Amino acid sequence: MSFLLDTALAQTTLIPTGGGINCNLGEAFKTGLFSWDCIASYVYYLINFVLGFTIAFALLMLMYNGYRYVLGPLTGEGTNEGAKKGIMYALVGTAVGLLAYIIVDSILVALSS
């Protein structure tokens, strides 16, 4: 179980220190010298960062709309239609984000190999 925690807490900065086979992204940012491996690694890093942000936002929206769905009739909104639509949109947004990640990841793997 500790390997999951180490993986989850490994990111300590917004500038990644790892990279491709012949690339140290932290050193590339300091010197300003980028190779194709470094650019591809950084694009891959940015995609993972955006995907994490998207999933976190979708989870927050699911919780908020779940709260609206449960307490909607008590607050005087009347119906729960807005909360139902919000939950649906959050799930659709998550699916679109995951599909975008799969497509871009496949393209980067094809270009880097």
Image (cartoon, rainbow, N blue to C red):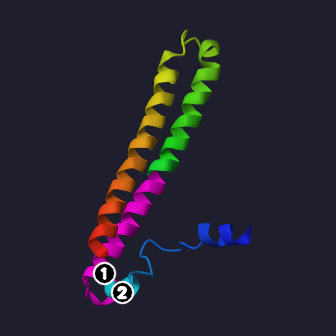
Where does the image place residue 110, in percent across and percent down from the top left?
Answer: 30, 68
Where does the image place residue 37, in percent across and percent down from the top left?
Answer: 30, 81
Asked whether disc 1 touches disc 2, contact meaning CB atoms under 8 Å apart, the reply is yes
**Which secondary structure is most common in the magenta stretch?**
helix
| Residue at (54, 11) in percent of width and height | 79
State the mark number for residue 37: 1
Q: Is residue 55 above or below residue 93?
A: below
Q: How many labels sit on residues?
A: 2
Give me the C-alpha separation between circle 1 and circle 2: 6 Å
Indicate yes or no whether the magenta region holds residue 50.
yes
Residue corresponding to mark 2: 23
Indicate yes or no whether the magenta region holds residue 98.
no
- Say which element carries label 2: loop
Residue in front for this viewpoint, 103 or 7: 103
The residue lying furthest to the top in this view is: 78
Q: Residues within 10 Å of mark 1 (few under 14, many from 20)?
A: some
> What kind of residue is marked 1?
Asp
Q: In the image, which residues are magenta?
A: 29-53
